[in-house]
Amino acid sequence: MISPDARFEDLFRRYYNRVVSYLVYRGFSLEDARDLAQETFLRVYKSMQRYRGEAEWQFLKTTAENLGKNRYRDESTQKRKGIRVPIADVPDPADPAVPADVAIERREETERLQAKYADAISALPLRLRECFLLREQGYSYEEMAAILRIPLNSVKSRLHDAKRRLRDEVGGADERHE
């Protein structure tokens, strides 16, 4: 009988490049794909005692896909926690021309609008919110289609619907995504 370590080495040798390629295809940079591939094989190694050796590629692909989704969710969550303040709206405390009460009013208005915007994004249906947040992270339409496993036209349509709903909810144009 072949030892679990030998089975793992064989899997790694045969499938590492394929896992990396799959993750790049899913929209990850080469560096991120390599990191995720390492995490994939680490997870597989930890479960080698239970692994029966069936459907090798499907097992590796599913593990890599789940880790990729987790990475995407983690990055999306971290991004949402931050508060965006346009630099033009941040009063310079050293500027004597800006009275303190005006500076406070500007900051409060900016915070109110950001909270309203964050609430509007959270209220979007999941399929629209996913597209919008991926675009916020700088993904191209093609990368978004690969990550979400939907046609390119669906990405465009969902993004358009998300922007329209945000404009309706928050008011005014969403200049960041025009």
Image: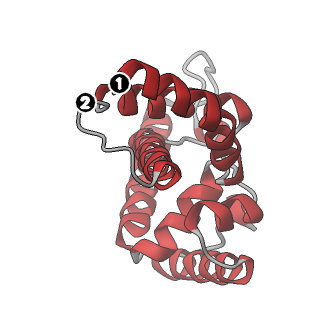
* Residue 12 relative to residue 39: left or right: right
Q: Residue at the far top: name it.
A: 94
Give the colour scheme of this rendering: secondary structure
Residue 110: percent from left, percent from top: 48, 48
Give 79 or 11, whichever is nearer the viewer. 11
Residue 44: percent from left, percent from top: 38, 33
Q: Amino acid at mark 2?
A: Gln
CB of mark 2 within 8 Å of CB of mark 1? yes
Q: Name the residue rendered at 36%, 31% in the picture.
A: 43
Image quarter (top left, top right, bottom left or bottom right) of the C terminus: bottom right
Q: Is residue 46 above or below residue 154?
A: above
Q: Name the residue rendered at 35%, 72% in the picture.
A: 123
Answer with mark 2 or mark 1, whichever residue precedes in sequence.
Answer: 1
**Residue at mark 2 to residue at mark 1: CA–CA distance:** 6 Å
Q: Name the residue rendered at 54%, 20% in the picture.
A: 93
Q: Secondary structure at mark 2?
A: loop
Q: Is residue 79 above or below residue 173?
A: above
Image quarter (top left, top right, bottom left or bottom right) of the N terminus: top left
Where is mark 1, residue-wise? 4
Q: Residues within 10 Å of mark 1 (few under 14, many from 20)?
A: some
Q: Residue at the far front: name it.
A: 1
Where is mark 2, residue-wise? 49
* Residue 112 relative to residue 154: left or right: left
Residue 96: percent from left, percent from top: 61, 20
Residue 6: percent from left, percent from top: 45, 21
Q: Residues within 10 Å of mark 2 (few under 14, many from 20)?
A: few
Q: Amino acid at mark 1?
A: Pro
